[in-house]
Amino acid sequence: MRRSTLKECTVLIAQTGRSPLTLSLRVWPTIALVSVLVATPLAILGFTIYSLNEKNSALEQQNENLSESADEVMQEIDQLDSEIQDLQERAGIPDRASAAPDADRDRSRGGVAVQIEPEELLAIAKTAIPNLASQFHGEVKPAVAETLEEEAARVAARPEGRPVKADLRISSRFGLRSNPFGRGYEMHDGIDFPGPQGTPINTTAPGTVEKAEYQRGYGYHVVIDHGYGYRTLYAHLSEMAVKQGDTVVADQAIGTLGSTGRSTGPHLHYSVYWNGEAVDPVRYLSSSPSKD
């Protein structure tokens, strides 16, 4: 017995006041058309959702990258602010409020954390950078330049090296020594270089001649004020090549070795004074400075 297959169907569409509209449709093409009409909106909706998900993922990645960039910028601003504060300290500028947004970052803090959006961080950075630049160029940079200039002048004023170029030994050192003229001990405030009369004597730093005169104890002697608390004394000279008020440079000849004043023989007495106190000149004979 053969099973019948439905191939066509008739659709009656009723019309008010008119005869019914009759449509003869083939079954399977009609079903296929209906399926397409139903599936198409679903496919469009699925594609739209997929596209939105893709855009959302891209926006999340973009926001993450922006957050990382904002964090890096803020870290660099903090580092720059810290370096400016170090320069302020070196230049002797009074401690003031930081130009960076997180000026109290070294203080103890607590409370509920509030996340700052990257756009807001970048806006803060945009304000902080000009403030830091203004602080650096307007105050810190000139003060540091002045400090460096002063430090260079202080280094130049520091006595350095030997006052005699000849290879002369030290016969009497700084400090307590036996009296070369009799009994007992005395405090020697310098060092002695014995040598041939007329040996050139040179300055150990630039400065101004404070004294160039004869005195019973030191004989002919020269005192040079180098500034920044430094003074040097060159005593028992046979001749003096400078006078009071002269400006001298380092290594300039100021006289010759002799035996004038209280002396047992030709030698140079050399003293170094720091803020009015005699210090051991041996500390200043080498080329590597030591701390005063």
Image (cartoon, rainbow, N blue to C red):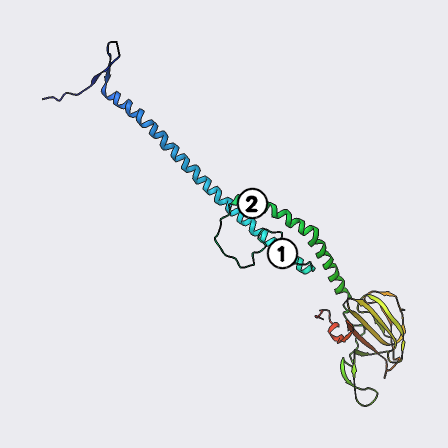
For disc 1, the marked residue is 83
Looking at the rendered structure, which numbered label has been put on residue 187? none
Percent across and percent down for residue 20 are 24, 11
Q: Residue at x 36, y 31 (%)?
A: 45
Percent across and percent down for residue 256 are 87, 74
For disc 2, the marked residue is 122
Q: Amino acid at mark 2?
A: Leu
Q: Amino acid at mark 1?
A: Glu
Q: Residues within 10 Å of mark 2 (few under 14, many from 20)?
A: some
Q: Quadrant of the N terminus?
A: top left
* Of 79 and 12, the residue lying toward us: 12
- In the image, is residue 159 above or below residue 44? below
Percent across and percent down for residue 239 are 90, 74
- In the image, is residue 205 above or below residue 107? below
Q: Quadrant of the C terminus?
A: bottom right
Which secondary structure lies at badge 2? helix
* Of 260 and 27, the residue lying toward us: 27
Residue 226 falls in which quadrant of the image?
A: bottom right
Which secondary structure lies at badge 1? helix
Q: Residues within 10 Å of mark 1 (few under 14, many from 20)?
A: few
Residue farthest toward the top in the current orientation of the protein: 18
Label 1 to label 2: alpha-carbon separation = 21 Å
Which callout, 1 or 2, points at the residue further toward the start of the chain?
1
* Of 208 and 80, the residue lying toward us: 80
